Image: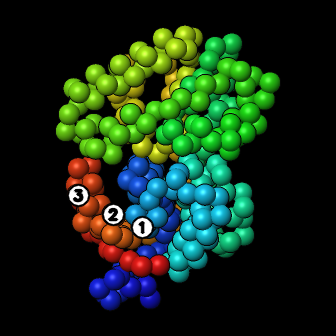
Amino acid sequence: MNHSVSGEPLPKLVRPVAVFDAGIGSYAAVAAIRRLLPEQDILYFADRASFPYGGKGRAELLAILRRTLRYLDGFDPAAILVASNAPSITVLDDLAGVSPAPLFGVRPPVAAAVGHAGSRQVAVLGVRSMVESPELRAYAEAQAGSRIAQVRLVDASPLVELVESGAFLFAPDRTQAEVDAFLGALDARHPGIAAFTLSSTHLPWLRSFIERARPGRRLFDPLEDALAAIVPHAVPGGGETLALVTEDERYSAADFRRMLDRLGVALPLHTVRP
């Protein structure tokens, strides 16, 4: 039986889908799984003590994910989703076999976006650490092949901040203005963008703002491919969601609770130490 920091036993789930990340953006994956699989139990693990994944070196990130997967195995998951682009792109392939559960990640569907764009350009939107990384460049080149010149890796950190700050909920007019300005500057630098794809789990929260700013421009969400891969492994349960969080001196569980509140997410939150 797994326990919280207080020593209380955690609720038992039926073969949950485990979703984890170090930030708040991954809750979008939890919400999407709940809509798609209403009877599926879900384990939502926010490893705030390891925030941010994108700032970790390869060896450290591998150690964190191996430790996390071993911990999640204690819940007998039907599948595990690494709901963060950084580890999905940089180390996911090295984790095969670490857990007996099927393991999935979120990677920008560059090939699909390029296929849609024809001769025009595709913008991959992500945080600066990712869009400047050799791993994302190599992934984009593998996806786009001979058409890599059509792919633009774009630092969209200002858009991510609109989610982290809660501005998209509490200041929608300002958020729309900032999205409009960001995309206007992007189009000025790179005319002819036909599609966006995302290299951040935060950005799906801004889908409606992006679509209002650029109606008709296709947005490819990496979560869609991940959900399609998870569905065959679904196991009906009670439709419960168990939310776990780690904390340290920088990022407290109380701060994370406030972040969930800003998103309008009313989940009981259990602090754990894997």
C-beta proximity under 8 Å, tags 2 and 3: no
Q: Which mark is residue 251?
A: 2
Residue 233 visible from this viewpoint:
no
User: Given the image, on which type of amino acid does mark 3 rest?
Assistant: Arg
C-beta proximity under 8 Å, tags 1 and 2: yes
User: Given the image, on which type of amino acid does mark 2 rest?
Assistant: Tyr
Front residue of 161 and 122: 161
Q: Residue at x 65, y 64 (%)?
A: 59
Q: Which residue is drawn at 50% across and 32% down?
A: 155
Disc 1 to disc 3, how far (Cα)? Answer: 16 Å
Q: Residue 49 carries which label?
A: 1
Label 3: element kind: helix
> Which image quarter holds the N terminus?
bottom left
Q: Which mark is residue 258?
A: 3
Q: Which residue is drawn at 49% across and 14% down?
A: 187
Disc 1 to disc 2, how far (Cα)? Answer: 7 Å
> At which x and y percent is residue 142?
76, 37
Front residue of 178 and 95: 178
> At which x and y percent is residue 160?
40, 39
Disc 2 to disc 3, how far (Cα)? Answer: 11 Å
Q: How crowded is mark 2: few (under 14 residues within 10 Å), some or many (20 or more)?
A: some
Quarter of the view holding residue 95: bottom right
C-beta proximity under 8 Å, tags 1 and 3: no
Q: In this view, does 44 lie to the left or right of 166?
A: right
Label 1: element kind: helix
